[in-house]
């Protein structure tokens, strides 16, 4: 029996070491920064975490002051799907004990960066994160997926805009049902002809330009202010 248990422990250790080496969800990305925030005496001073993919990842580089001046923290990782968000949700959100979290995800799920797209699974990932945040006393701010009608890295993908709109409909309904705040990036940034993003806000149809980020800031800030009272 002892031999069997020892062998099982070896197998488990090898599996865990393999996962750590692979770091599929990139848990290591924000380890240092997270420790610094958790060590701050003022970390709970209306801290807001933005969780997302490359769109969120690129935001602080576009406007560092928007984050620093408002005690916002970016936790975006390029290329990630909601499956990876969910794996790192405790490390990059809950452990920071923010007052609120802004969750923006789904476009890379539609692009099938990890798995074949399943709207319900993606929606459930978003729902699970919202429920985890809520259970930990973190105010939930859900956002629409930004409009898109093409993927430069997945040129053969079609029917992108309808998938975005369908997922957004479910996200908005969830926010209404649960009383979460909701941010509609889609409507103000949509090209009504293509249902993708307006050219004035993007160069590639997915990622915002600086002008696109300014528009997003204009949209999201009043919602955050309605949730996080200063």
Image (tube, grey):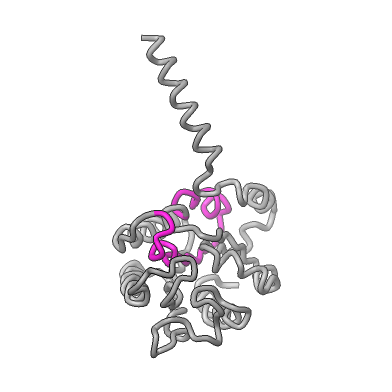
Q: Specify whether residue 103 is painted magenta.
A: yes
Percent x, y of residue 130:
41, 60
Q: Is residue 172 visible?
A: no
Percent x, y of residue 70:
65, 71
Percent x, y of residue 38:
64, 50
**Farthest-out residue, bottom:** 193
Q: Is residue 112 visible?
A: yes
Q: Quadrant of the N terminus?
A: top left
Q: Quadrant of the C terminus?
A: bottom right
**Farthest-out residue, front:** 156
| Residue at horizontal 47 percent and vertical 55 percent from the top | 85
| Residue at horizontal 46 percent and vertical 31 percent from the top | 15
Q: Specify whether residue 12 is painted magenta.
A: no
Q: Quadrant of residue 62?
A: bottom right
Write down the region rendered in magenta. 85-114
Front residue of 172 and 84: 84
Front residue of 153 and 118: 153
Relative to 113, 17 lies left or right: right
Vertical comparison of 189 with 7: above or below = below
| Residue at horizontal 55 percent and vertical 53 percent from the top | 92
Q: Quadrant of residue 3?
A: top left
| Residue at horizontal 49 percent and vertical 58 percent from the top | 80
Percent x, y of residue 218:
56, 83
């Amino acid at each position: 029996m002892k031999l069997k248990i020892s062998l099982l422990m070896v197998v488990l250790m090898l599996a865990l070491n393999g996962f750590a080496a692979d770091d599929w969800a990139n848990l290591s990305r924000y380890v240092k920064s997270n420790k610094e925030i958790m060590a701050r005496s003022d970390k709970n001073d209306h801290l807001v975490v933005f969780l997302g993919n490359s769109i969120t990842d690129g935001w602080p580089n576009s406007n560092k002051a928007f984050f620093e001046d408002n005690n916002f923290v970016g936790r975006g990782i390029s290329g990630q799907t909601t499956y990876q968000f969910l794996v790192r949700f405790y490390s990059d959100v809950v452990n920071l004990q923010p007052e609120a979290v802004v969750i923006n995800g789904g476009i890379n799920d539609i692009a099938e960066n990890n798995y074949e797209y399943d709207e319900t699974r993606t929606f459930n990932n978003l729902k699970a994160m919202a429920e985890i945040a809520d259970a930990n006393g973190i105010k939930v701010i859900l956002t629409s997926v930004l409009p898109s009608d093409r993927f430069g890295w997945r040129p053969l993908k079609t029917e992108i805009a309808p998938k975005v709109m369908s997922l957004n409909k479910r996200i908005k309904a969830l926010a209404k049902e649960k009383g979460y705040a909701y941010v509609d990036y889609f409507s103000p940034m949509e090209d009504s002809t293509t249902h993708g993003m307006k050219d004035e806000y993007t160069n590639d149809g997915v990622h915002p330009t600086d002008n696109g980020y300014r528009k997003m800031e204009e949209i999201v800030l009043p919602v955050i202010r309605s949730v996080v009272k200063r």
